[in-house]
Amino acid sequence: MAEDRKKAGFVVLVGRSNVGKSTLLNALIGTKVAITTPKPQTTRHAIQGVVNDERGQVVLVDTPGIFRRAPDRLTSRLNEKARESLEGIDAVIYVVDPTRHVGEEEEIVRRLVDAVDKPKILVLNKRDLQGEFRDEYLDWQDDFDAVVEISALQEKGVARLLDVLFPLLPEGDRPYPDDLLTNLSDSFRLEELIREKVFLTMRDEIPYSTTVRLHETADRKDRTLYLRASVITESPRYKRMLIGQGGLTIKRIGQAVRKELEAVTGRKVYVDLDVVVEERWKEAFE
């Protein structure tokens, strides 16, 4: 009897901003791969995470949320990245938030998904919140191969989503080694972690004007992990706010980074952060 062929494929997570795509990616992978915050523009790059089990391998691609308006180069490029991620994939997981009304932004995403001639799963996230607009999204169910209701935050329904997904994928060889969880470099993940803490620490307007640049990581003789990075912002006014009175705000950001890294690595961590003004950094964003 011939051995059963394994399934393998690239699957894109798509949806408007703040529907829980990155939280779902982390839940599917079983560890933190993508940063998560309650703020839009948290995800700025297409991030890959890998699921391996006896059925095969799924390469999940988390995408930036789609924005109806693009007031600057950064937002425009985020929209482009989301659209580009729909090319050359094997299936689509379209994540929606039934606590939010279907509006113009959602219709833009839906049209993008409709144009993809691949298997599609509609995922209603945040089932724990009993979204009042659930029926608006269920009206679309005939356009999808399956509908799955989940809570990514509570990791409920995630196993069923994989059960539904694997049969929709083609047979093939695994694109990545079995022990790989993500294609992200360590330096990129550190920059993203710092940016996450900036988003969680600062008021609404500041995170969207910032990015992070890692300059150095080093293992010191006492096994302390040392990292030095800059928080880049576009305005001297934001620089003052990021530093805070007596340097308290940037210190608080560094402490949050240190706490998470020490919990993950089991090592002492020293975080050396400064704030730099680059007024046109968004224009160079790729």
Image (spheres, rainbow, N blue to C red):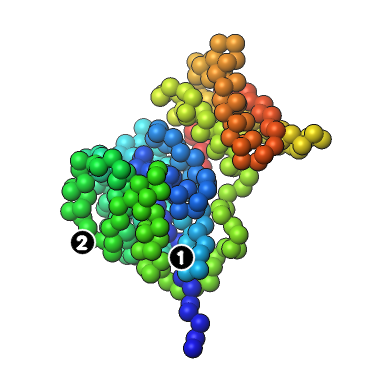
On the rendered structure, is 18 left or right of 244?
left
From the viewer's perspective, is residue 30 above or below residue 281? Answer: below
Q: What residue is pinned by disc 1?
A: 9
Which quadrant holds residue 119?
Answer: bottom left
Q: Residue at x 30, y 43 (%)?
A: 128
Query: Residue at coordinates 51% horizontally, 64% vertically from top-left?
Result: 53
Kindly tell me whether residue 181 is visible in this rendering.
yes
Where residue 88 sits in the image (x, y, percent)? 43, 62
Q: Is residue 208 left or right of residue 103?
A: right
Q: Secondary structure at mark 2?
A: helix
Direction from residue 211 to residue 267 in the image, left or right: right
Residue kind at label 2, given as amino acid type: Asp
Q: How many marks?
A: 2
Answer few, some or many: residues within 10 Å of disc 2's Cα (few below 14, many 20 plus, some between 14 and 19): few
Nearer to us in this view, 173 or 230: 173
**Which residue is the site of mark 2?**
142
Q: Secondary structure at mark 1?
A: strand
In the depicted view, which residue is nearer to us: 232 or 132? 132
Amino acid found under the numbered disc labelled 1: Gly
